[in-house]
Structure formats: structure tokens, C-alpha cells
């Protein structure tokens, strides 16, 4: 039994202050400049994102929750019981925890880049579920998602290597990847599932195309929480690179690019801005934009094709009454 034990943790990667971060610097030097949205999620950024999910304008979280609440029993007919539940971008772990009674996993393996945040939330969750083995994986799965030797040894040590694996990827975070990158990540998820016992697969939430005003309000809320989330990225970059961005001098911009089927978030320089860091600097003209995020909105038939391309079998699909958000089950 696994009682009163602190969850175990494997830290594979965490962005560190003082490291060189060539990817960040290259993005800052490009025209137009860009920063990967994974840098939103320092400890404050993770909390700001949790606040976003409470906003009346931000429909995805509550719409997805309604799809799970309404169709959870139907999903459970396809998703195997007793699986190892791998939760990508777990954050507060709340969404997966709500599914424990339906999916009855044999182990819970949350994966998140924001290691300190995950450590806290997972410790609290382990207290509430003392019998469920939990392993936190602190890693940046956006570049490579694979279980390392430590995680495989942890599963083997609990005789869980041949349990089916269910990769849970809710929240439409797949939308934050360019379609080619999304396909690469889905292929990796497929390989991870395939390495476990029969019956595994991917349970994934995907945001859908809808009227522009609904989309743009969701990413530019009245209270300015999303604006703070966007600007907090600059504080995180300041810490990582020892740079001197002045967050208050950057305006939050969110717009729907219908040709690309994506919300784009940018930070727009208010006045000329010169940003310096050890070994480099970049001057931004007044009004110049720094691209911080894409959030793709999919048509369900296109996403189903992407899943098939990644190697999954015929997917099942559930949605809400408005057809705003979809949850797919894609078997290995
Ligand atoms: C995490 N991800 C799915 C969110 C989204 O909707 O693309 C991130 C976010 N950006 C602004 N608001 C929320």
C-alpha cells in the first residue's frame, strides 16, 4: 500500500535563471520577435492562468468541464479502468482528480514544466488519495514527450509497466502548438501509449472555431487578468535572462486570425523600448509587437484527421450543446 507517502518526483527539466536560454534569445532577435508560450508558466503565471479559467469570458474550461460532466459515463465505456493516467500540463491537477472516480486509474503521473507549482498541488492531492501511487514529472514535454528511465523504473517497481496507459491532455493546450508541432506531440503520445498494455489511448480536449467576438473576448477580458498573464511573461524572461523588460510599457493584444484559425496574443511596445540582457539587446519601435501565443481553434473533422495521422485508431468525440468544445478519445 501507498499510504501517507509524499508523491515521488522526477525533475527532467526546468527553465533556470542564469542558464543561457538560446531559444529565448533567438526569438527576441527575430523580426517579428516571438517568445514561446511555455514561458508563461512560472509560479505566478500558473496561478494567473488558474484565475483566467474562472473568468466569465473564458468559456473553454467550463465548457470542457460540462462535456466531461455530461458525457463522463459514455467516455468511461471506452477509456480502460485501472490505467496509468499520464496528465500532460497537469497544473493544479484538478481536472484529472475529478475524473478519478470515473476512470479509476492504477497510478497518476502528472507532467508539467512548472515544477514548484506541481510539487505543491501534487502533495495536497496525494493526501486526499493516499492509496493511489503518484509520480510527478517536471519536464518540458513541448520539445519531447517520452517517459525517461526513472519513470519507467518507477512503473516497473509497482508492476504497472503493462497496465494500459491513458494520456490525458485537456484544456485545448494542443491548440498552443503549430499544427506540425501538434502532430509531432500526438505521435509521441501515441508511442508512450503503445509502450503500455493493450487498451490505452489519448483523451484530449480541443477548442473549436466559433464567432470572432466570443473568441476575442475570451482572450482580452474586462478585468485584465489575461493582460497580466501576458505581461508576466516579460517578468519571467527578465529573471531567466537577467533582462530589463518594463512590463508596464507593453500593451496586451489578442486577435483572431481567421486565415490561420487561431487566436494570437502579442505584446505591443508603447513607445520605443530597448531591452538589454548580458550579451545582447534589442530595440523595439513604438507599436512593434512581440508574438507570445497562438491558440488554434480546430474543426472537429480536421482534428480527427490529425489524430489518425499520428497513428491513433478511429476516434470517438463528444461536445457541448453549442459545439464550442470537443473531447476526443483516440485509441492506440
Ligand atoms: C493553456 N491554453 C490552452 C490557454 C489557451 O486558451 O490557449 C492559454 C491561454 N492564453 C490566454 N488565455 C489562456
Image (cartoon, helix red, strand yellow):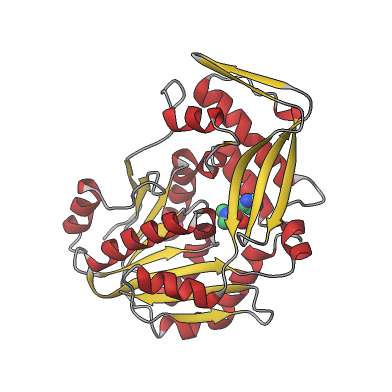
Name the residue nearer the viewer: 263 or 150.
263
Against 327, residue 281 (above or below) is above
Q: Nearer the viewer, residue 289 or 245?
A: 289
User: From the viewer's perspective, is residue 118 above or below residue 312?
Assistant: above
Closer to us: 200 or 219: 219
Residue 207 x %, y %: 59, 67
Tell me which residue sits at (60%, 70%) in the image: 65
Image position, residue 245 (x, y; %): 65, 23
Residue 289: image x %, image y %? 68, 36
Total numbered circles: 0
Indicate left or right for 315 with 148 as reference.
Answer: right
- Does residue 282 appear in the picture of this structure? yes
**In the rendered image, which quarter contains the C terminus?**
bottom left
Q: Position of residue 158 (x, y in %)?
A: 20, 59
Q: Quadrant of residue 287?
A: top right
Q: Nearer the viewer, residue 203 or 80?
A: 203
| Quadrant hosting residue 274 | top right
Q: Which residue does the image show at 46% across and 53% down from the upper left?
A: 89
Q: Residue at x 61, y 70 (%)?
A: 208
On the question of residue 6 being in view, the answer is no
Q: Is residue 24 above or below residue 141?
A: above
User: Which residue appears farthest toward the top when viewing the image?
Assistant: 278
Picture residue at 54% right of the left edge, 27% below the top = 29
Amino acid at each position: 500500500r501507498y499510504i501517507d507517502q509524499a508523491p515521488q518526483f522526477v525533475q527532467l527539466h526546468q527553465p533556470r535563471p542564469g542558464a543561457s536560454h538560446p531559444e529565448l534569445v533567438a526569438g527576441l532577435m527575430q523580426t517579428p520577435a516571438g517568445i514561446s508560450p511555455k514561458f508563461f508558466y512560472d509560479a505566478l503565471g500558473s496561478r494567473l492562468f488558474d484565475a483566467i479559467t474562472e473568468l466569465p469570458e473564458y468559456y473553454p474550461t467550463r465548457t470542457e468541464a460540462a462535456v466531461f460532466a455530461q458525457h463522463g459515463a459514455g467516455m468511461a465505456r471506452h477509456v480502460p479502468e485501472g490505467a496509468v493516467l499520464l496528465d500532460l500540463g497537469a497544473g493544479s491537477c484538478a481536472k484529472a482528480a475529478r475524473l478519478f472516480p470515473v476512470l479509476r486509474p492504477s497510478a497518476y503521473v502528472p507532467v508539467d514544466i512548472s515544477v514548484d507549482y506541481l510539487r505543491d498541488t501534487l502533495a495536497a492531492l496525494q493526501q486526499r488519495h493516499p492509496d493511489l501511487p503518484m509520480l510527478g514529472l517536471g519536464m518540458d514535454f513541448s520539445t519531447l514527450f517520452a517517459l525517461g528511465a526513472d519513470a519507467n523504473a518507477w512503473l516497473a517497481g509497482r508492476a504497472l509497466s503493462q497496465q494500459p496507459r491513458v494520456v490525458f491532455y485537456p484544456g485545448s493546450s494542443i491548440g498552443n502548438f503549430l499544427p506540425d508541432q501538434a502532430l509531432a506531440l500526438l505521435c509521441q503520445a501515441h508511442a508512450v501509449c503503445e509502450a503500455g498494455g493493450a487498451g490505452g489511448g489519448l483523451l484530449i480536449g480541443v477548442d473549436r472555431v466559433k464567432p470572432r467576438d466570443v473568441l476575442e473576448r475570451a482572450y482580452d477580458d474586462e478585468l485584465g487578468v489575461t493582460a497580466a498573464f501576458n505581461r508576466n511573461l516579460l517578468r519571467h524572461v527578465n529573471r531567466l535572462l537577467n533582462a530589463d523588460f518594463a512590463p508596464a510599457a507593453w500593451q496586451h493584444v489578442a486577435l483572431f486570425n481567421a486565415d490561420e484559425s487561431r487566436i494570437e496574443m502579442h505584446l505591443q511596445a508603447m513607445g520605443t523600448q530597448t531591452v538589454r540582457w548580458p550579451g545582447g539587446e534589442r530595440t523595439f519601435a513604438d507599436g512593434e509587437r512581440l508574438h507570445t501565443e497562438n491558440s488554434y481553434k480546430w474543426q472537429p473533422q480536421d482534428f480527427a484527421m490529425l489524430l489518425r495521422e499520428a497513428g491513433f485508431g478511429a476516434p470517438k468525440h463528444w461536445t457541448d450543446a453549442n459545439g464550442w468544445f470537443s473531447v476526443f478519445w483516440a485509441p492506440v
